[in-house]
Amino acid sequence: MLGINTSGLRKVFARHPTKWLSRHRGVHPAEHKQESLRLPIGDLLDSTEFYIPMSDINGMPLRSNYKVGDKVLGGQAANQVRNINERQYLIPTSGEIVGTKDILISGRVPYHSKCLKLKADGRNEILQPENTGDYHNCSQEEIINRIRNAAIYGMGGGGFPTWRKIITGNIKHLIVNAVECEPYITVDHALIESHSDEIISAITVLQELIKKYDVDETSATDNSGKLITYIAMEDNMQTAIAKLNKSLDASSLEHTHIKVQRTVYPAGSEKQLVYELLGREIPIGQVAAQQGILSLNIATAHAIYRALVHHQPLLHRVVTISGNGVEEPRNYWVKIGTPIKDVIKNVKLKNADNMQVYLGGGMMNHRVHDTNMPISSSTNCILVFTDLDTNNMDDDSLLYKRQQNNASALPQLDKYITNHRECIRCGLCEQVCPVNLLPQNLYWDIKASKFELAEEDNLSSCIECAACDYVCPSNIPLSEYYTFAKEHIKYEQQNTLQSDRARTRFNDHKERLEKDKLAQQERRKARLAAMKKVTPNSPPNELEVKQRKIASLKIQIEKTTQALDRWRTIKDASDDSNDSKVPALQQALDKLKQELQELDTNP
């Protein structure tokens, strides 16, 4: 089941769209950012137990490297990576594997995952990497292995493997994305204010990596012959902009520009940002890296810098902890693998007995049903609310409640989605859609189970930003319909793929049997032909085979002759005789004599 319960302000962003993917599309909900920016990033939150998922984001199981009782160090690989689609998880700190636990992982589509339970020993010992040389002297393969072994995935929420973007090569533009368009989230803002010099150093490292992976020496340039780098920020990040400008002026970086975007949601989406900065549209089904544009979240860039320069794997990250249930919203360093229940234990709550916990900002977030769920490298915000009335449409937050999803069954719409007023065809959803879709048409297609039409209407281009939900006067959870439809289509495609594979395997097996049968017949004919060609000068083993065959034929002829005489006697003495038996035996006897004659007369 995919379920939802919506609430939130229905403020439509005043400006109407003027062109596709323009900055005027989207919405501007209440920001709630200053609450968590009053204090600098807090120290690392403490925990004595950690959980490491043994399933990827699609719920597919991973192969663990450890069993209960094993002693481990921070930075060791927790699972085997068998293909490029499997995610690498790391042990967050030193300790002992004490068991496993089944945890419901919240997300776009929730799933259950078996997780390794780690009991920390308090020493925080980290595995020393094998290659600690200067990254300037490393080969392409060594650099990519460092990034992969550091388990660096997109930290802006997408979780895309960073190394796969870098190895694309022929990068012409670098975009460092610090646009935090969602309400509540201030991770990038706080990171810039506290580590602006390291951010600039990280950009230097990225520029060097881009040049290292260029196939064409002139590919990583614009018309001026230089690689152009953009640091994208919003106009509500004035203190961070000032701090980064100061660090940039003190550096030797050239052709690097801070681009300040108007604060509007969802301006931080990759395709929207590329259009705003470069005026280019990324084709459907492609990512920016395939068009020569490397777009990385600023926290991801910082993690790459720490991995290549300081040889530190990605074991902790900054997380915004906010919401009306938190007395002192703030950003904290949190170890990856820390259970959410331990995170919220370390902050002051207004009412710990009545709270609701969400992952993500105020627009694209997911209800946490199991607080044992561990923090991942993509977790950038935890919201805690108390006494939240999810039926109050005037509440100042847009929050989603998803029911547990059974990944092995066909997704079904439930009452949380379908219990709403009907569409009044106002067109507001179309006006705010950042990718120029017709949300109301998609809604009608999906509601009528016409998924093929939804695909034709570019359902796959939907980024599920929920801007259409935000402005809908009928409170239709449109983004949930789109999520449901995508999962339904994915399920059907997987079933079709499995059926095609099964059919292919069956046909291949049948073809192999036919080939084996023909080959066996050919081998039998070849052996018989070889025996007929045996001569007195043939090798002893071939003569022996021929002699055994002749002896066998003589024995068969003798027995068949005796059987024929016996049946002839029975036929003469009885009126009720087997007329067909005698001819059959005679025919078999003639065939045996002919075969014996061929062997005897063969030179």
Image (spheres, rainbow, N blue to C red):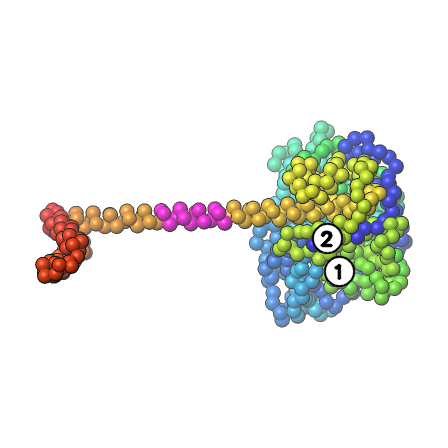
Q: Nearer the viewer, residue 267 or 302?
A: 267
Q: Is residue 4 left or right of residue 487?
A: right
Q: Is residue 213 above or below residue 48?
A: above
Taking the spot 26% from the left edge, 50% from the top edge, the residue there is 524
Taking the spot 65% from the left edge, 62% from the top edge, the residue there is 114
Q: Residue tagged by mark 2? A: 414
Q: Is residue 326 visible?
A: no
Q: Which mark is residue 318?
A: none
The N terminus - image quarter: bottom right
Q: Nearer the viewer, residue 510 or 343?
A: 510
Q: Is residue 282 left or right of residue 552?
A: right
Question: What span is in magenta?
Answer: 502-515
Residue kind at label 1, given as amino acid type: His
| Residue 300 part of the magenta-drawn span | no
Taking the spot 82% from the left edge, 65% from the top edge, the residue there is 345
Q: Nearer the viewer, mark 2 or mark 1?
A: 2
Q: Nearer the viewer, residue 544 or 350?
A: 350
Residue kind at label 2, given as amino acid type: Asp
Task: Mark 2 or mark 1: name the one nearer the start of the chain.
Answer: 1
Taking the spot 79% from the left edge, 36% from the top edge, the residue there is 430
Residue 38 percent location from the top left of the image:
90, 53
Q: Is residue 430 visible?
A: yes
Q: Residue tagged by mark 1? A: 369
Q: What type of secondary structure mainly makes up the magenta span?
A: helix
Which secondary structure lies at badge 1? loop
Residue 424 percent location from the top left of the image:
81, 39
> Seen from this angle, which residue lies furthest front?
575
